[in-house]
Amino acid sequence: MTLPTAGAHGTRVRSALAAAVGLALGLGLQLLDRTPVIDVLGSVVYIVFIACLLRAIWPGFGAAGSAATAFGFATAVELSQLTELPQRVVDAFPPSRLLLGSAFDPIDLVAYAAGAVLAFVVQLVLIGTERVAASSAVDD
């Protein structure tokens, strides 16, 4: 089976597949014993998943834009852990721990940066350097 390569549709398909792989890897890491290496890998995969999901939804966003946005989102979530809000949400809805985490860890910020770089590279390799015009993204 060959994947579409041109236009917004091909970008969406490839990005969605990369996001699905990232999600599966992230969930698989949840099954392993918690170690510092597993935590860092999980943070890296989290960024790749978010960036590829963004690109699947908005193909014209670009590899750099989606990777930077994923990094910004994850950093905001990490910094929010310095407050009580995430813990309150987790207390009310325990599965939200997968998104909100449990405690601030500055190492995660480094892992998010590595994940953003990896997300950028993954998108360049899987999608290529094509830049989808906003008008063609709306048409698909």
Image: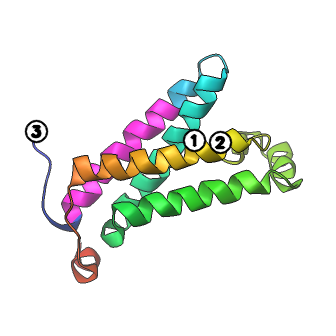
Mark 3 to mark 1 CA distance (whole Å): 34 Å
Q: For the point 10% across and 43% down, which residue is it? A: 2
Disc on res. 44: none
Q: Quadrant of residue 72?
A: bottom right
Q: Which residues are magenta?
A: 9-26
Q: 10 Å neighbourhood of mark 3: few (<14), some, or many (≥20)?
A: few
Where in the figure is residue 13, as x and y percent of width and height?
26, 53
SS of the residue at dot 1? helix
Mark 3 to mark 2 CA distance (whole Å): 37 Å
**Which numbered mark, 3 or 1, is in the foreground of this view?**
1
Q: Quadrant of residue 104?
A: top right
Disc on res. 108: 2
Amino acid type, mark 2: Asp
Name the image colouring.
rainbow
Contact check, label 2 and label 1, Cβ < 8 Å? yes
Contact check, label 3 and label 2, Cβ < 8 Å? no
Direction top: furthest residue: 33
Q: Which residue is mark 1?
A: 111
| Residue 28 sits above or below residue 95 on the image | above
Q: Which residue is mark 3?
A: 1
Amino acid type, mark 3: Met
SS of the residue at dot 2? helix
Amino acid type, mark 1: Ala
Where in the figure is residue 11, as x and y percent of width and height?
25, 59
